[in-house]
Amino acid sequence: MTPPAQDAQQTSSPAASATADWPNPGYAWYVVVILTLAYTLSYIDRQILAIVLEPIRRDMNISDTQVSLLAGMAFAVFYVAMGIPLGRLADRVNRRNLIILGITLWSLMTAMCGLAQNFWQLFLARIGVGVGEATLSPAAYSIISDYFPPERRIRPLSSYNIAIPIGSSLAFIVGGTINYILALIPEIEVPILGALRPWQVTFFAVGLPGLLFVLLLFTMREPARKERHGSAADHGKGIPFKDVLRFVFKENGKTFFVIFIAYGGLVLYSVALTIWMPTMFIRKFGWSLSQIGMAQGSILLVFATLGIIISMNLATRLKQRGQRDALMRTSLIMGALATPPSIILPLLDDPIWVLALYCPIALFCYGLYAVVPAVLQFITPNQMRAQVSAIFSFFNNVIGLMLGITYVALITDFVFQDPMKLNYSLSIVAITTLPPSLYCLWRGLKHYRESMIRAEAWLTPAGGKD
């Protein structure tokens, strides 16, 4: 989809760069903070299930495979199904208001998880969480890109992803703490609701605060849309979805194939390890939920956050040196460093050494994923940014979330047929997913450079240094 020559000249001129009406930087970073807090909240609600998987499995008398469906498929199936239409909606309507509706929905549905009495009730509640969270990131990436000029965009987009380790770590820490406090009380009597298990109370504790957070979103202004692709007459309406598909799968097909498959494979192991590690410690080392929750949460809070900071600074430096593939190359470096310890970790017999090795894994795995928003936004026009993010999310969640968590459970249930060999399943997943994904990423560097060259023809090179 080639823009008219007149538009291309206008968007690439230095004058356009110098006079671009970008919002106040201080307020722009305020928006990043609000959106990052929203993303943190979403990850707490998404990941809280990991810390209570084992008590849910015992209370509901279900298998590892059924548990994996609650953690992965129940959340992801509607997250990916609704992601693309919601992304298309975000490219046309007020993005802030769409996010407000999403947070309200997923917070209520997280609390509803605490009312579940059986597998199917919990499965349906997790679907609701996924639908609500599907509204956030496509709209958030688009909003952030409209608050910062291209040369200053890597840090805010990467900073938004700091919510992933913070939200994940808080889910483990809060979940572990609640279970520690309630460990001596088998059931909690709540008026109207009756007797509740500690894991049910945990869902209420993390879900309901989101309804108060919604009020903060009203202080955020919807930004004007910039860097549009196409004629001025098209700016007031959305681009036909067939044009979005043509842009992704035809004009930039090789690039997006690499992005979808490679990042999906890389996140597969990261998600699988994050979700199943508490259960592995409970079964293999006899740790309590509070012990592993505090340990894993603390490591994520420190090392995963550090990984994102290191990653975005490395990507910025490489880009300032003129490397068009700086963003994807940063992920490749981080992924290569994460692979050896990821294969070894599940095989260790000392829990302290397992936690020690988890530190660099958390750093590199979260670091490799930190630059993904910028990878997408730098090569995508404004009118389709949320939609392209949603398409990426579709592949990423099908591969990483739906398949990853269940992949581990299927190996444990049907290959080893022994829940105590969960650690071997995790090692097999690392061996079969990480090296192929890195090879795909390496082969895709040249394709990404080509997409960057095409994007430079119509993206406004706004002034300023990162």
Image: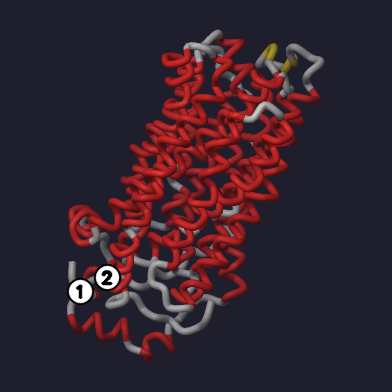
Outermost residue toward the top in this view: 61
In the rendered structure, the answer to whether residue 439 lies left or right of residue 362 reads left
Q: Which residue is mark 1?
A: 3
Q: Residues at badges 1 and 2 in contact (C-beta under 8 Å)? A: yes
The amino acid type, in three-letter code, at marker 1 is: Pro
Label 1 vs 2, first from the N-terminus: 1
In the rendered structure, the answer to whether residue 41 lies left or right of residue 298 reads left
In the rendered structure, the answer to whether residue 164 lies left or right of residue 70 reads right
Q: Secondary structure at mark 2?
A: loop
Quadrant placement of the C terminus: bottom right
Q: Secondary structure at mark 1?
A: loop
Question: Where is residue 141 drawn, in percent x and y?
Answer: 45, 58
The residue depicted at 55 percent of the width and 61 percent of the height is: 311
Question: Where is residue 58 drawn, in percent x and y?
Answer: 61, 11
Count of numbered badges drawn on the protein = 2
Disc assigned to residue 231 = none
> Residue 160 versus residue 422: which sits nearer the camera?
422
- Res. 215 visible in picture: no
Outermost residue toward the bottom in this view: 15
Question: Where is residue 400 drawn, in percent x and y?
Answer: 42, 38
Q: Is residue 463 above or below residue 95?
A: below
Label 1: few (<14), some (14–19) or many (≥20) C-alpha neighbours in 10 Å: some
The residue depicted at 42 percent of the width and 53 percent of the height is: 138
The amino acid type, in three-letter code, at marker 2 is: His
Q: Which residue is mark 2?
A: 229
Q: Could you give the CA–CA distance between mark 1 and mark 2, rounded to whole angstroms?
A: 6 Å
The residue depicted at 41 percent of the width and 35 percent of the height is: 432
Label 2: few (<14), some (14–19) or many (≥20) C-alpha neighbours in 10 Å: many
Question: Where is residue 405 drawn, in percent x and y?
Answer: 47, 29
